[in-house]
Amino acid sequence: MNVWSKMLTALRGGANEMGEAVVDSQALRILDQEIRDADSELRKSKEALAEIMAKHKLASDKVSKSATSIAEYEQYALKALEAGNETLAKEVAEKIANLEVEQASEREQAEGFAASVAQLRKAVSQAEGNIKRLKQQVDTVKATESVQKAQMAVAQRYGGSQAKLQTAVESLERIKQKQAERGAKMEASAELAATSAPDDSLEAKLRAAGIKADSASADSVLARLKDKSKA
């Protein structure tokens, strides 16, 4: 049971390593998608902010209209009192009281919208700043990644070219060595030929000048025979 537990743990560990390797290899792509998701959420937040701002404006407009109506009916009530019509004045006062209740509710609603707008503005501003900084950092990371890949490619190519260059230098040295050996053999052969072979050209020049007789001529043979007969 202990062995099976260790095997399962090892398998989980291998799966985690594979998962981390996949995540690492796709890190920039995942980060880009996360930024796009954040941008999408930010757009939704801005749309929600715009809606709440519109509601706040409507609520504020209602408060202003209620204030205008209240001021208008107050003038009516004052005129009724001036006319001595207290019954009408009281009726107008009731209308004013209802308007003030509505105005209080509308003001509370407008203030709630104003607080929401302030909070959302702050959140949107922070989100925009965070996303902007994140995009800048991603650009830097991408640039660094490109530079490092280029450096690795250059290093690999340089290493390969160095190995090829070393091989070429060794081949060149072998060729030079063989040529030197061949040249030395040719010089030695020429020296041997010069010491062992008679100088035929010099002998021919002496015979042509009449300084040295040709040992193989008929005259030389006849002279040699006459010398023998006299003896």
Image: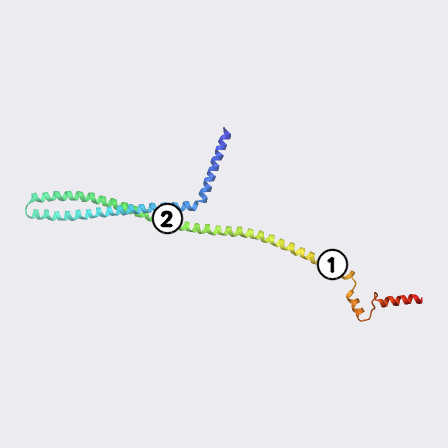
Q: Position of residue 108 (x, y in %)?
A: 22, 44
Q: Quadrant of the C terminus?
A: bottom right
Give x and y (percent) for residue 221.
86, 66
The crowd level at tag 1 (other Cα within 10 Å; few <14, some 14-19, many 20+) is few
Give the residue pinned by disc 1: 189
Q: Which residue is drawn at the image coordinates 53% and 52% (left, top)?
A: 157
Which label number is shown at residue 151?
Answer: none
Report the amino acid beneath label 1: Ser
Q: How is the image coloured?
A: rainbow
Tell me what residue is drawn at x 9 percent, y 45 percent.
Answer: 89
- Residue 214 or 127: which is nearer the viewer? 214
- Residue 225 shown left or right of residue 116 in the figure: right
Whether residue 57 is situated above or below residue 231 in the rendered picture: above
Rendered location of residue 7, percent (x, y): 50, 32
**Upstream in sequence: badge 2 or badge 1:** 2
**Of 21 and 65, the residue lying toward us:** 21
- Locate residue 220: give its quadrant: bottom right
| Disc 2 to disc 1, C-alpha distance | 86 Å
Q: Would you identify the image quadrant in which residue 191 lies?
A: bottom right
Q: Which mark is residue 131?
A: 2
Q: Are marks 2 and 1 in contact (CB under 8 Å)?
A: no
The residue tagged with tag 1: helix, strand or loop? helix
Instruction: Establish if 156 lies above or below 224.
Output: above
Identity of the amino acid at label 2? Ile
* Label 2: element kind: helix
- For label 2, the crowd category at 10 Å Cα-Cα, with few meaning under 14, some 14 to 19 and many 20 or more, is some
Q: Viewer-proximal residue, 129 or 181?
A: 181
Image coordinates of residue 87 in percent, x first then y, are: 7, 43
Q: Residue at x 15, y 47 (%)?
A: 69
